[in-house]
Image (cartoon, rainbow, N blue to C red):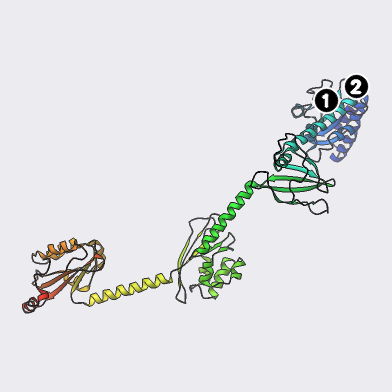
Amino acid sequence: MLFDSVLAFMAGCLFLTGITALFFYTRTGSAGALQMNKGRDTGGQAPVFLFDRDFLIDASPSGSALIGEYRGEMGDLDALFHVLGRQFPTLRDAVSTLGWNDEMQVPALQDDAICIQLKNQHGLTRISLETVQIDDSADRFGALERAAQAEELHLLRSVARQSPQLIWQESVSGNLIWANAAYLDYAERTRPDSGDTVRVWPGTRLFTDLPLSANDGAAPFRGRLSVRLHGEAVEHWFDITATSLDGSTLFYANCANDTVRAENTQREYLQTLAKTFAQLSTGLVIFDRERKLTMFNPAFIDMFGLPVQFVAARPTLEAVLDRLRNMRMLPEPKNYLSWRDQFRALDRDGGDGAYAERWDLPDGQTFRVSGRPHPNGAMALLFEDISAEVSLTRRFRVEIETGQSVLDALPDAIAVFSDAQTLIMTNTAYGDMWGERDSDKLDLQDLRAALRRWKSRSAPSEFWRQIEAFGQGRVDRPRITDEIALLNGRRLRVDARPIACGMMMVRFHTIEDRATLGAVKSLPDQSSKAVGR
């Protein structure tokens, strides 16, 4: 045969250049394929293909027409499998298992009068459709092509008709030309219930706000529209896309109810946050991943006096800090640039990095500033005006230090116990008298521990038991006083009296001599027979 002779000639001429051999073989192979079919009296209608692996080298006119529509969407060999796959389901496996210089016949699934002949010649695969009856070969091959086209058309119609996506076609004037089942279902649900089970072709457009994009040559419509169904108060939202098709418009509508609800929920959540932030007395600013200002509340503006136009322009973190520095609303560090860069050191991936610092401004204001990065790379800064708190703390500290200095200046030893009988304050004279110079030990002492120390350094006296009972008494208990003697011979006048908040103050006054003691006893209010003794 001519085809075999050409292949043999090519095998003997492999030393020629690849391009020349391929061109020669392609032209000769095509002629041989067509000549073979002519020899079988097929009238040139039998599709014949010649493949080098997946690449189509040559094909008969009927073969090119058979797969020409699909070659742009898929490969040459895949296009052939797509067209013949229904009638020859084992064709792909047969081609993949075809050996070197091997031949194979693939029968049709339903038609015994047609088959596919496979032949491998020196690595090239020849695929031809053949019939048992030569006279009706043209009709059978044509019927095969028409059946493949009809099957694909049926599939496409079924996909479009049964798709959950709303698909419909409108004319230039907006009249409905075609619609799938999903569109017709929504169109029926927009009309009042009539009790009629027969589907009526929609007389009006389902989406009345949809523009006629194909009328004036404008760009195809793409947007979100809603439709209200009969008897339902909630609107149904759809994302609609339009494309031009032969003077008409083809529309696709995807249900967007979940997306709209999610967006509304997010919008309401952000509005709630904005209202909450607006009521806060704490200044709040949020910077995104690029460290641009994305959110702020009025308290931040009031604290620093920044112009609204400035913060509304979404400045960067560095720009905000620089602006505050120019307004003298920042502390004055030794190295401003390194101080500013510490904000960049915060982990943008939401790690453990955090910022906490107290800003003492030149005008006397004090801010507590805290910041923490978030997992999405954003960062929030909180500003609390603690000027009043710091001023109050300083005043309390001054008052406490003043009171302690006054106590230390008194010659009498003084000890103050809380309502829980804990020693909370003494003066210098008390430390000199009882050996309590270490102020750190005050928190560890109570009235009983103090009584043990007092008893160990004084003569036995029932007055110590009275003081212990006095410390456990009520708030309005009367004052008690008595005289005790120390082991070193000194005599003390001990006075216990209640003070504010249920606390008790014990005062130790040194008696210089017996004459002084007699003079003190002669006074009515200094009698040793005190109330409660």
Q: Is 269 displayed left or right of 519 in the figure?
A: right
- 305 vs 448, left or right, is right
How crowded pointer 1 is (Cα within 10 Å; few <14, some 14-19, many 20+) is rated as some
Residue 19 visible (yes or no): yes
Image quarter for residue 474? bottom left
Q: Amino acid at mark 2?
A: Ile
- Compared across the picture, whether 81 is left or right of 341 comes to right
Sequence order check, earlier mark of 1 and 2: 1
Front position in the image: 217 or 317: 217
| Left-right relation of 58 to 448 | right
Q: Quadrant of residue 185?
A: top right
> What crowding class fits label 2: few (fewer than 14 Cα within 10 Å), some (14-19), or many (20 or more)?
some
Q: Amino acid at mark 1?
A: Gln
The reply to whether residue 53 is in sight is no
Query: Circle 2 sits in a helix, a strand or a loop, which is it?
Result: loop
Which quarter shows the C terminus?
bottom left
For residue 315, above or below residue 175 = below
- Residue at 61% across, 52% down: 263
The N terminus sits in image quarter: top right
Nearer to the camera, 151 or 160: 160
Numbered circle sitting on residue 27: none
Q: Residue 121 at what x, y percent from top left?
A: 82, 28
How many numbered marks have been drawn onto this rendered protein structure?
2
Residue, disc 1: 117
Mark 2 lies on residue? 134
The Cα atoms of the two marked residues, 1 and 2, are separated by 15 Å
Quarter of the image holding residue 513? Answer: bottom left
Q: Position of residue 344 (x, y in %)?
A: 54, 63
Measured as percent of width and height from the top left, residue 508 is found at: 16, 72
Q: Position of residue 111 (x, y in %)?
A: 82, 22
Mark toward the viewer: 1 or 2? 2
